[in-house]
Amino acid sequence: MDTVSPSERSRIMASVKSKGNKSTESAVVALFRVCRLSGWRNQYPVDGKPDFVFPKRRIALFVDGCLWHGCPKHCRIPHTNRSYWVNKISANKRRDNRVRRRLRAKGWSVFRLWEHDIGMPRASLTIERIRKSRPTD
């Protein structure tokens, strides 16, 4: 059980600035450069705040952290305050599904990449799928 109210927890979490994913984002940018993949933006006004957006192709790419998004291979729920983390990760998964459905309903393709897949064959497959998609212009 969380020790603060949901509104207070929301305020606290909103004030935490992203630091831990900068190296992950840098690795994806480096991968884009090595693969000569262009046309991406990392801050673009679209539902769900994707990590990378390819506006002309209408592709949203989310790079999911193993803990925060419940990776079946690597997510290890912290032992401290376990019920909080189980609920938090479940809520994140539900939100991810809602965002995916909303974007698809608006004609966007949604790609998800686990942080542990960066630099692996899975990342290369995702980049090839993005490259093969047709721009909507």
Image: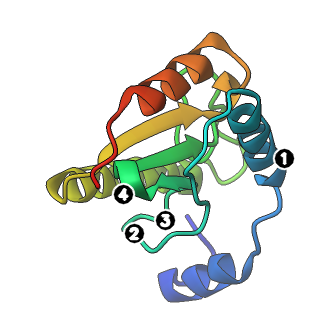
Question: Residue 43: where, in percent of width, then height?
Answer: 59, 68
Q: Which residue is mark 4?
A: 95
CA gap, disc 1 to disc 2? 23 Å
For residue 23, the mark is 1
Q: Earlier in the sequence, mark 1 or mark 2?
A: 1
**Spatial separation of the CA atoms under disc 2 and disc 3:** 6 Å
- The residue lying toward the viewer, choosing from 3 and 131, is 131
The amino acid on which the numbered mark 1 sits, given as a three-letter code, is Ser
Instruction: Find residue 46 and name its label.
Output: 2
Disc 2 to disc 3: CB gap under 8 Å: yes
Identify the residue at horizontal 45%, vertical 33% (top origin): 130
Q: In front of the other: label 1 or label 2?
A: 2
Total number of numbered discs in the rendering: 4
The image quadrant of residue 27 is: top right
Q: Give x and y (percent) for residue 136.
A: 27, 51
Q: Assign a secondary structure to mark 4.
A: helix
Q: Comparing marks 3 and 4, which lies closer to the viewer?
A: 3
- Determine contact: label 3, label 1, CB under 8 Å: no
Marked residue nearer the N-terminal end (4 or 2):
2
Residue situated furthest top in the rendering:
121
Q: Which residue is mark 3?
A: 49
Q: Position of residue 121 (x, y in %)?
A: 62, 11
| Residue 4 shows up from this direction | no
The amino acid sitting under disc 2 is Val
| Residue at figure coordinates x 30%, y 50% from the top left | 100
Q: Quadrant of the N terminus?
A: bottom right
Is 77 rendered above or below residue 91?
above
